């Protein structure tokens, strides 16, 4: 259950959503794919990047993060923004061996505070080899 909700809506408030996005980056960088997956609802969907086939369900999400961490990826949360609704966005960079990606992630939260959808916006113009 979220620590606080927007009055009258039952949805997580802005501070909760922003803190969860920062925690997501911290857990990812700590190499804890299970804890990252725990931020998600059991039936959540990830589209990373948007336009690629979605990753759906707890087992697939856990594997997605385990594979990303095993590849040596590290995340930096540059800016995190909330909304009056149930979504928050984060400008991020991801660094992998030989590759740097700049993008935006948008997370949609359920009433229980779990992420129900994550969409990562980045494309061919947003990465470079290093």
Image: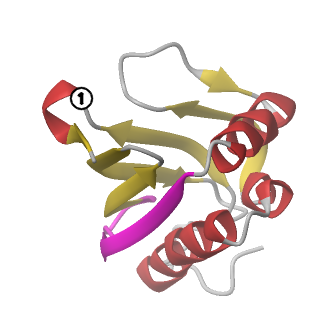
Total tally of numbered discs in the picture: 1
Q: Residue at x 60, y 75 (%)?
A: 26
Front position in the image: 13 or 38 = 38
Span highlighted in magenta in the image: 73-87
Reading the image, the residue beneath label 1 is 123
Percent x, y of residue 76 = 41, 69
Residue 14 falls inside the magenta stretch: no
- For label 1, the crowd category at 10 Å Cα-Cα, with few meaning under 14, some 14 to 19 and many 20 or more, is some
Relative to 65, say whether 26 is above or below. Answer: below
Front position in the image: 125 or 15 = 125
State whether the magenta stretch is mostly helix, strand or loop.
strand
Left or right: 30 in relation to 48: right
Q: Residue at x 62, y 68 (%)?
A: 29
Percent x, y of residue 114 = 69, 58
Q: Quadrant of the N terminus?
A: bottom right
Q: Which residue extends farthest top?
A: 53
Residue 85 falls inside the magenta stretch: yes
Res 24 → quadrant: bottom right
Percent x, y of residue 42 = 82, 40
Res 85 → quadrant: bottom left
Asked if residue 118 can be seen in this view, the reply is yes
Left or right: 62 in relation to 72: right
Q: Which residue extends farthest left?
A: 125
Left or right: 7 in relation to 115: left
Badge 1 marks a residue whose secondary structure is loop
């Amino acid at each position: 259950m979220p620590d606080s909700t927007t009055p009258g809506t039952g949805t997580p408030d802005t501070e909760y959503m922003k803190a969860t996005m920062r925690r997501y980056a911290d857990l990812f960088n700590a190499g804890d794919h299970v804890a990252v997956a725990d931020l998600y609802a059991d039936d959540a969907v990830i589209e990373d990047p948007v336009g690629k086939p979605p990753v759906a369900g707890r087992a697939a999400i856990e594997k997605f993060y385990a594979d990303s961490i095993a590849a040596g990826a590290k995340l930096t949360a540059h800016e995190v923004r909330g909304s009056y609704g149930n979504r928050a966005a984060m400008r991020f960079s991801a660094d992998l061996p030989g590759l740097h990606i700049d993008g935006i992630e948008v997370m949609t939260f359920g009433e229980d505070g779990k992420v129900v959808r994550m969409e990562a916006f980045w494309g061919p113009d947003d990465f470079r080899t290093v």
